[in-house]
Amino acid sequence: MPFTHVQDAVELMRMEYAEMPDLQLTFWQAQRLWNLSDETCGRALGLLIGAGFLVRTADGPYCRPALISRAEARRSTPPPAVRGGADRGAGSRPRSPCCREQRAPLRPDDGGDGV
C-alpha cells in the first residue's frame, strides 16, 4: 500500500472529524464512508490515535478526545431538577425554558387577540 494513500486517508479523516467534532464512527463505518481498504483504514486510524487526534471508546467507535471528556462530564453531572415538579398546580402544564412568562388565557369576549 503506498504511503501517500495512507497519508491522504489521514488528511481526509482529519478534515471530516474537524468539520464534525461529534462524529463517532466504527472501523467499518469509517472504511465504508471513505471507501478504504481494511489495511489503509486501519493504518490511518492508527496514525490518528497515535497522534492523539482520535481515541477509541470502550464501545468501539473512533471519536475526538474532547467528545469523550464531554460525555464523561455529562455522566458525572446529575440531571437538572424539573422545575415546578410536585408543587405545580393540577391544571397547569410545564413551560418550556424559552417561554417562562405566564400568559393569560384568551377570553371569548376579547376578540381572540388576548389584549
Image: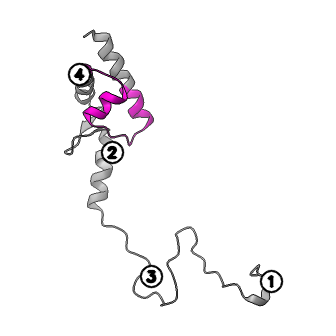
Q: Which residue is mark 4?
A: 43
- Which residue lies under the disc numbered 3? 84
Q: Position of residue 50 (x, y in %)?
A: 22, 27
Name the amino acid, label 1: Gly
CA distance for labels 1 and 4: 70 Å
Image point (25%, 33%), residue name: 27
Residue holding disc 2: 67
> Which image quadrant: the N terminus?
top left
**Badge 1 density bin: few <14, some 14–19, many ≥20, Cα 10 Å:** few
Q: Quadrant of residue 48?
A: top left
Q: Residue sitting at 52 percent across and 71 percent down?
A: 96
Q: What residue range appears in magenta? A: 13-40
- Of mark 1 and mark 2, the one earlier in the sequence is 2
Residue 56 horizontal/vertical position (percent): 23, 38
Amino acid type for the residue under numbered disc 3: Gly
Mark found first going from the N terminus, 3 or 4: 4
Cα distance between the residues tagged 1 and 2 = 52 Å
